[in-house]
Amino acid sequence: MAAQPEPFRSETTPEQLADLRERLASTRFAPALSGDEWTHGTPPAYLAELVEYWRTEFDWLAAERRLNALPQFTADLDVQTLHFVHARGVGPAPFPLVFTHGWPGSFWEVHKILGPLTDPAAHGGDPADAFDVIAPSLPGYGFSPHPGTPGITPARIADLVNTLMVDVLGYPRYGAQGGDWGAAVTSSLGREHGDTVAAIHLNMMIGALPAELRTEPLSAAEQDYLEKIQHWRAEGSGYGHIQGTRPATLGAGLSDSPAGLAAWIVEKFRAWSDCDGDVESVFSKDDLLTNITLYWLTNSIATSTRLYYESTHSTPNTAFVETPTGFASFAKEIATPPREWVARAYHLTRFTEFDRGGHFAALERPDDLVGEIREFFRPYRS
Amino acid sequence: MTIVDPFGAGNLMSNSCQLRPSTAGTLDVMTQVRPFQSETDPAQLADLRDRLARTRFAPALSGTDWMLGTPQGYLAELVEYWRSAFDWPTAERRINTLPQFVTDLGDATLHFVHAKGVGPRPFPLVFSHGWPGSFLEVRKILGPLTDPGAHGGDPADAFDVIAPSLPGFGFSPHPGTPGMNPQAIAELFHRLMTDVLGYSRYGAQGGDWGGQIVTALARTHGDSVAGIHLNLIGLTPVDSAPSTDAEHAFQAQLARFLAEDCGYAQIQATRPATIGAGLSDSPAGLAAWIVEKFRAWSDCGGDVESVFDKDELLTGITLYWLTNTAATSARLYYEAGRATGMFSSNDPGYVDTPTGYACFPKDNVTPPEEWVRRAYNLTRYTRFEHGGHFAALERPGDLVTEIREFFRPLRG
């Protein structure tokens, strides 16, 4: 049976930081392929600027203090040690909510919504909307080590998360929220743990629909969506293809080169956010580097990409999700499914479109997401 | 590199990059050919050793098997050998025994091997390497092709052999401009062969990207190109609906290759700068990226060193490292993809030029004869029992014989 959670704090040795700075100082850049444009990927000029800031100005110890302000724990679940944030709600009846991050993010994605969700009264809300918030690090991400065994798929992670919620933390009934891989985990929670999961909220749809969910003719909006997905598969999913097939090969360079890691991650924060091509209009260098440094110091890029491999090489359960589902569609998400498409796969009880924001909703539009989560879960609290 | 239209390299005619015809006289241009020798600054080698010594490896994802890619254990062994035992100056001296030159062609500076044949009437042959190889792929076949008499052959089979480095590979810098796709490279090769080296009629051989480039050469310069010989198919036929059992099996093989083995091509074709950042900064990452392909695509039974020893692997990898060409070489995928748009299946048309095809069983795909015949004027198709993607390195004897026999009736 699961052990009791242990408190956790991030601790970094000066040697790790000295090594990182030395690597950054000796970065060898590729020749520029396309000037300052991002058409070929992260341009060396921007990368050089980011690397120089990382080496000379970024203050990891200050960032780490901010991470450590979050109440963090680890729990041993069979072979898996899971790291998670667990913040108690302030209100008459806080409802437990598990928030699952995605790639290339981390549990840090929760930091802006944590206060308003746990303590709404302190953020202009109603204490009746308080949540207990649990935000695990996915296995192989940040402070959750990968167990090293095959088969850590989104469905398996959902099993772990359910064990954490029910057996370790003692919540018999809870809600779940996520985008990106978090959406896959959250969907599995809704599909396979409907006895404990009251409702789920998603800000992304992941995976294809099986034929039995596609019997109704496609609407024009659905056709547009699928065309956009098709285009993205051709032009924007190379990272997913290599991560899904050769994570070790890719991981070798990204584990050895902090500049290579930064290029790999920052490209996605730019491409998938509502930043109009200027990533720093949404994420400061400090924001970006807090997340990137977390990947670097935990040497978790290879293990994080393994989730793509495991997911690609498994047969996911794609059955209709009976658990009540809310969906927040942010305009600059990779692709925004229309309501009818989401409703093919989920028992959709709420669908909200936002005209601002992208893939990283909890970081980009925390207030919108908080409002949405509060309203969606209100009828499912009891 | 990859095979067919899924990466958009098929429609070689549609690319917009047109090179100016040379206006210089042949003699003037000839004077622009400069001998070339590789020279390495000792500081570069010291820097490389430093980087190798402080390699930070990823956690092992899958023990010692290669299911998830290059395993950490093998990579650590290769990196340690590279740092402590591999002798680049010796490798470089061997490289420098090849007769190498550079010449300027518009924006591009092309590096190439040019070895004259020994025989009554050597026939000019341009040999094009692929990814993740280099012009060094020619080294085992160069002697037998240029001087058959010294290698148990007939001097009448002698070739002048020209082996360029593709732009952005090794000693051919990438010009930095868009559009350097297989068609544009074929144009450069044609100018090299005709304007610079003065050959009016020649043959061409290649696999991998080389197969696409020599296909483009045949299509646009059939008046000069007497015949082409391929060891990987360079385009999709007009009619690509399979009919025979062998064609159905090939389609299944291709689908599996695209689904399971083309991640490297997908990322290189869409974000070469992003993948290039890490590969340019981490020699271990570069080695992992390249060695995986030498293992997967060769006839090595899973043991890459049964075909390529560490010195051979590291000679190629060190060439990529010292020339900092991981990103520019990956760019070829991007440019090929832009030529038609990713995943298009535009029909590039039939190749009238006489074509020979050598099918090595462990190549990443092995199209049957009838499939190749749909796209090419196929006059010879040979299926070998051994060998893979890197035919010139793995089965040089077979490839040499094949080239001699295929081109014999085409020498004119």
Image (tube, rainbow, N blue to C red):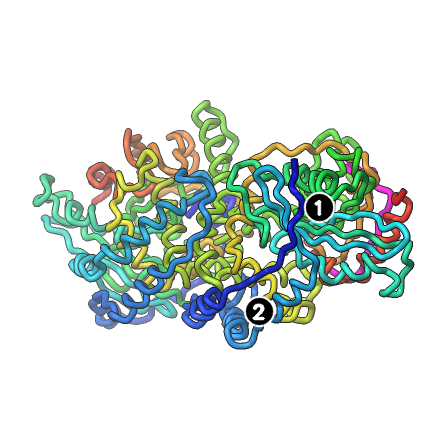
Report the front residue among B50 and A18. Answer: A18
The spot of residue A327 in percent (x, y) is: 80, 48
Residue occupying image coordinates x 50% and y 29%: B242
Q: Distance between the Cα atoms at labels 2 and 1?
A: 29 Å
Q: Residue at x 31, y 43 (%)?
A: B390
- The residue at the point 90 percent across, 53 percent down is A92
Task: From the top left corner, tell me how far across and down residue B237 is, in percent.
Answer: 47, 38
The chain letter under disc 1 is: A
Q: Name the residue under label 1.
A: A183
Q: Can residue A224 be seen in this view?
A: yes
Q: Is residue A293 left or right of residue B377?
A: right
Q: Quadrant of residue B350?
A: top left
Q: Give neighbour class at mark 2: few <14, some 14-19, many 20+ (Cα, 10 Å).
A: some
The span shown in magenta is A344-358
| Numbered circle sitting on residue A60 | 2
Q: Is residue A335 left or right of residue B237?
A: right
The rendered magenta stretch, by its main secondary structure, is classed as: strand
- Answer with the quarter of the image where residue B69 lies: top left
> What's the residue type where badge 1 is placed?
Ala
- Do pointers 2 and 1 mark residues of a single chain? yes
Reply above or below: B33 against B406: below
Q: Quadrant of the C terminus of chain B?
A: top left
The answer to which of B354 and B77 lies nearer the viewer is B77
